[in-house]
Amino acid sequence: MNRTMNQFKSILFLLTSMIALASCTSFDATKFESNTKSAIIDFLNENIGQVVSISIVVEEDIYQYHLGTLSNGDSPNNQTIYEIGSITKTYTGLVVAKAILDGKVELDKDIRHYLKNNEYENLELSNQYITLRHLITHTSGLPEDFAYSPEDIAQGNYIEKIAKYSRDNYFDDLRKVKLNSIPGEEYQYSNAGTNLVAYILESVYEKPFELLVSEIITTKSGEKLTKFRGTTYEPGEITQGTDGYGKQMPLASAYWYADGGLTSSVESVTRYIQYQLSLEPEVAISHQLLNESWTGHGTAFYWNTYKYDSNEQMLYQGGGSMGTSCWLTIYPKKNMGIFIVTNVASRNTQEELEAISNKVIDYLIAYKAIKPGS
């Protein structure tokens, strides 16, 4: 799950985009595949991670590559299952968009209306209540998480803490929490807020969140391997990765929820990209800007956005677990999308994947410009 996002993310993204663009000013546009693989090989050579898988969708064309070897000696393929961390949040946002379309929720309504009791007087500050808009844009004033603290991560108690944390624990903490800021005024990345969104969706639909994701998204998109597996999976079924020092890390998706609990494969995420590029009305809603800054960066339904020229914007989201990092970018008007994942999670891995994604889109645009029939 992406824990590096903060109020400086837009500036960082702008700088890395400029660096990536500068690095791609001289290349042979006819060699799209070799250019793409070269960028990935450079990453593998400089990191402890063993593999990288990538899927690139452009209109009707799909390019998929897998480089490296897993610790068991196998090569990854389109069915290799990875944790996708905070990319899960974009699924959560898409379910919210469908709930808006169905008349189940409203973006700017007091969320306590959906909690169906009066136990949450603490969920407002200075007469400003929390809304779904605040939760989706990480401006609710809720902390990053209830289940653990930064100290728990530093002391190695993280997995133990979240493994024991229950829904009842969550709502106990929700009744006691003090908001860190007035809702809508300050950005603070909040997994606790994202999980609250899922609990609200369960309440209004009267269905488990896992079933909502299946009915509203993955059944329609054809994502057979995108699932909340919890603790029920076969040994070796999900790819385990390492931290930045080569230490094998445990799976965390088993205990995460709407904030980062999904696992998937290149094949299934490719179908998700195609669904994100479709004309489904809930997809269009989920791409709508909820806020935007002077830098051209903004937020949609758990998507970060960047308007890179006057007519077009991209949507992007990073994801990570204890030992996996991934990056997903959608270019709706160009009908393009890129997903890239690796089995390493260091401090800078997601930014490095972002840089690869930026290079690949430049390679792809140049290739399409000279490809016969394009």
Image (cartoon, rainbow, N blue to C red):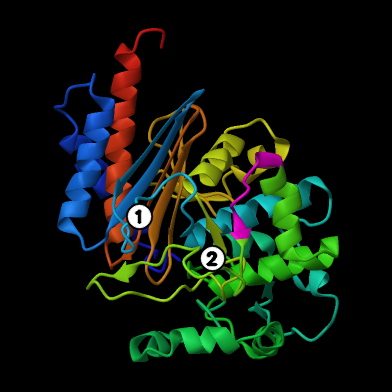
Identify the disc placed on residue 359: none
Q: Is residue 96 above or below residue 57?
A: below
Label 1 Cα crowd, 10 Å radius (few <14 / some 14-19 / many 20+)? few
In the image, is 362 to the left or to the right of 374? left
The residue under label 2 is 260
Q: Earlier in the sequence, mark 2 or mark 1?
A: 1
Magenta-drawn segment: 220-227
Which quadrant, please, contains the N terminus? bottom left
CB under 8 Å between callouts 2 and 1? no
Q: Amino acid at mark 2?
A: Gly
Residue positioned most to the top: 373
Q: Amino acid at mark 1?
A: Asp
Dot 1: what SS?
loop
Spot occupied by residue 350 in the image (x, y as percentages of width and height):
33, 57
In the image, is 307 to the left or to the right of 22? right
Residue found 29% across the figure and 21% down from its top: 366
Determine if the magenta segment contains residue 213: no
Of helix, strand and loop, which mostly describes the magenta segment?
loop
As rendered, which of 281 and 186 lies closer to the eye?
281
Which quadrant, please, contains the C terminus? top left
Distance between the alpha carbons at the discs numbered 2 and 1 = 26 Å
